Amino acid sequence: MSAAEVTADHADINEPGKARETFRAVTRDVSWIAESPKPHKLWLVALTLAVLLFGIGIWSIYCVVMRGIGVWGNSNTVCWAWDITNFVWWIGIGHAGTLISAVLYLTRQQWRVSINRSAEAMTIFAVMAAGIFPLLHTGRPWFAWWMLPLPNDMGSMWPQFRSPLMWDVFAVSTYLTTSLLFWYMGMVPDLATFRDRNAGKGNNVKALIYGMLSLGWRGSARQWHRYERAYLILAGLATPLVFSVHSVVSFDFATSQLPGWHTTIFPPYFVAGAIFSGFAMVLTLLLPLRYLFNLQHIIKQAHIHAMCKIMLATGMMVGLAYASEFFIAWYSGNPFESFTFISRAFGPFWWAYFAMVSCNVLIPQFFWSNWVKNNNVLIWVLCIFINIGMWFERFVIIATSLARSFLPSAWSYYHPTRYDVGVFVGTIGMFLMFFLLFFRFAPVVAISEVKGASDGAHASGKKGAH
Amino acid sequence: MATETPPPDKATEPRPDSENQTGDASGKHGTAGELYGYLAEYDTPGELVEAARKVKDAGFTEFDAYSPFPVHGIDPAMGIKRTILPLLIFGGGFVGATSGILLQWYCNAYSWGWNISGKPTWSIPANIPIAYELTILLAVLTSFFGMWGLNKLPQVWHPLFRSDRFLRVTDDGFFIGIEAKDKRFDVDKTKALLGDAGAIDIEPVYYDPDPAKKAMPKWIMAFIVASTAFALIPFAIAAKARNSHSAEPHVHIFPDMDFQPKFKSDTANDLFADGRSNRGEIPGTVARGWLEEDTTFYLGLTAETGGQWIDGFPASYPDSPSLTPDLRGKPFVVDAKLLKRGQNRFNIYCTPCHGYDGRGQGMVPTRVKEQGGVWLARNLVDKAGPVVFLPNGQLFNTITNGFPPTMMGYGAQIPAADRWAIVAYVRALERSQIASNEDQAGQR
């Protein structure tokens, strides 16, 4: 009997043992993925592919580190090129996880419980992938510790804390730490579930590993009390953090003087784009895995509807930002600004601009239709387009502005080399590899939160009445 | 592609709810030690809350409820006081904000101020983002570690884990455990209380008889001690290095920038016969654009060998790439444009000593006089000379090579064309101040 059937059976929930049956079904439906002795064949295929891509990435990174970033195509004025494009793209994707786990928690959106765990995992792996790019872009990644304010023997060579690039260092590392701790803390009760199930079956090695990871969690009410307080406060802290991180990333651009970058619209525009791309990536990952691992009754169609609506809303915010940029370029009367935006849409990178607008503004309009929102294959395809469109958005901002700056002598065009492609593809491989491993070995759905949000969980009356 | 469905689940098959196991003293781990307390299971979260309220009302304090998810309403039922965690987190955030500001102030304003376009070294708005992120970071770390610390976790052993039934607390089990150390604990009465509250099962839980199992396992402790000691080694090396002297050079891990394959200027070098790394000019050659063969323009002399100082101005500019394109090869015209240029250059280079009016009362002589010293600057417009009597060529030469000991040559700073413009301006200055009646007659 699946959880769907059990929870549908509202009348029965007051009978002795019925509520517990619901909870058992949730536990079983989630934990069997980690417990089945053989992994799913498609999972193995996907993992192999991901590891292959990751291998390409490692080789490319090796070449970039050993020979210098001159192997990339950015040895001209388009010096930020793919590298920073990829950084901003990955960081943006990372935003959905925290948004789902923190902002939707504070706004009491119950549907988040089915997807928050995997979205948080996605966040962490996306931020890890993002971190690779600025590190490589320094050219000498082994000196990355110079970004820390450490006493040194070169006089008082401290970091310049008023540089937005230093703000980035602090914002991104705080974000990674917070996401990691939030994710792990949420997972501890579910790791304890895995511990107890393995102990019950006599799998002592697994029980030991999960036991160490779950820190001896007993689910006591006094522990839950502090745990819930900490969870609420962490959500409250993560919410301003998630908005600050992409704002700080946008400051890298907005505090410069370059037409097309030097605008105050960037922080909200970047945050909306981040949420937009993050939800697209969540659906890209979860739609196939939900189907393969039979999680349809936990990650319900209604939840997918909600995510589609968020993408529709944020997609239109992004569209509004595109329009505002053009309006301001005209309204400001600044000839450099106008020139930049005309060349953005009709200049040498016109194809990237139109890819961006069609993927980010037109594609989400399909989500007005309920028929589309029920067609998961179509949603998946649309989400892939949105991922591509959001990548192009960052590319358009970076490449078109740098390729057409103030001095015509500095104008140039950007061609990626195989190392640009290799590193990017490699981070996709790394991201997918970690995510697939997470899906096989960790509690992919927040078991305790799903139980807490189910019908039998309310203690308002006797026998689980609600 | 077929989806997989969960296999039948043995680990969580419903177990018979029986109340007959209460006498079973031995858990899965064998023999029993001292009594820890009683563990009672309830069917639903609602019943758990009711039972917890009864236990509290009976006066127990050393008891706890256990559930797979946080049961709402159990905190007041059990009389759980609000945790002090939020206060700790506030403290963490406060420390983060202060240390974020202090760190930036120390590094960028106190220890090493950055002078960027003369902007202030300390400007709060630009320091806010990092202070903001550090506030959040420290608050997050406090909430995470504070929560585990207050919950006394990680704890790798607990008597409750000796109960097979308790394995289901993370699945579907709702339990209340009353500890034997509670003052009101009584084997029979406590059991009866739990039963009256609607328990579907009650069992005693015992400590492990082996005292070693009531503490952190030895190998974990050994690992913690060893890894802590290991982690301190780099700090010990750093501390030693800071407090000792060594004649050895630095360790250069990445020597590519520190030791570059090049020769620096003014150093000894065995490669060349003269033993110097500087390579001087090759005799008989001159750099492109620097062949100054026009002696009138560059030296102020008439064209023939052993020439005299010229009285007027050169006839034309040489066609040399060292001149700006608008002058190359053009005739030399004394006009308002040239005088403006001359005034501009004169005001930059000459006025500090000679003054704006050319009377030798510039800022330097004035200041030296105030300080009680003597600094003589030539009065360029003195009717009695000698400057007014100098031919233009000699005046040009004086600007180029100076007038020792006080005036140095300006040939290196001022290009030749500008020096001629200054000559023209100085002549104009003279005329403006010592002009004769005849001079003025033509102006009327």
Image (cartoon, coloured by chain):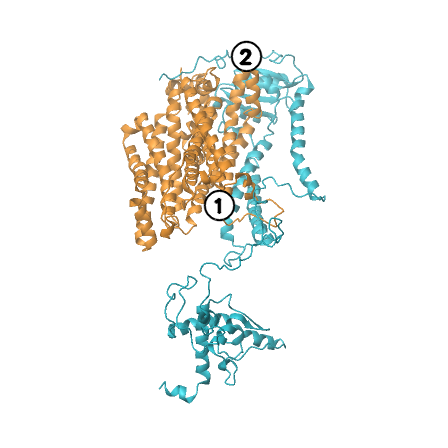
Callout 2: SS: loop
Q: Which residue occupies 37% across, 37% down?
A: A391
Residue B19 tag number: 2
Q: Which residue is more in the foreground, A87 or B227?
A: A87
Q: Is residue A404 visible?
A: yes
Q: Residues within 10 Å of mark 1 (few under 14, many from 20)?
A: some
Q: Residues within 10 Å of mark 2 (few under 14, many from 20)?
A: some
* Residue situated furthest bottom in the rendering: B437
Q: Are marks 1 and 2 in contact (CB under 8 Å)?
A: no
Q: Which residue occupies 43% across, 87% down?
A: B436
Residue A90 x, y percent position in the rendering: 43, 36
Chain letter, cyan in picture = B
Residue B239 tag number: none
Q: Is residue B49 visible?
A: no
Subunit of mark 1? A
Residue A111 x, y percent position in the rendering: 40, 29
Rendered-image quadrant of the C terminus of chain B = bottom left
Side of B250 relative to A1 (left or right)? right
Chain letter, orange in picture = A
Report the number of numbered marks: 2
Side of A279 relative to A135 (left or right)? left
* Residue situated furthest right in the rendering: B244
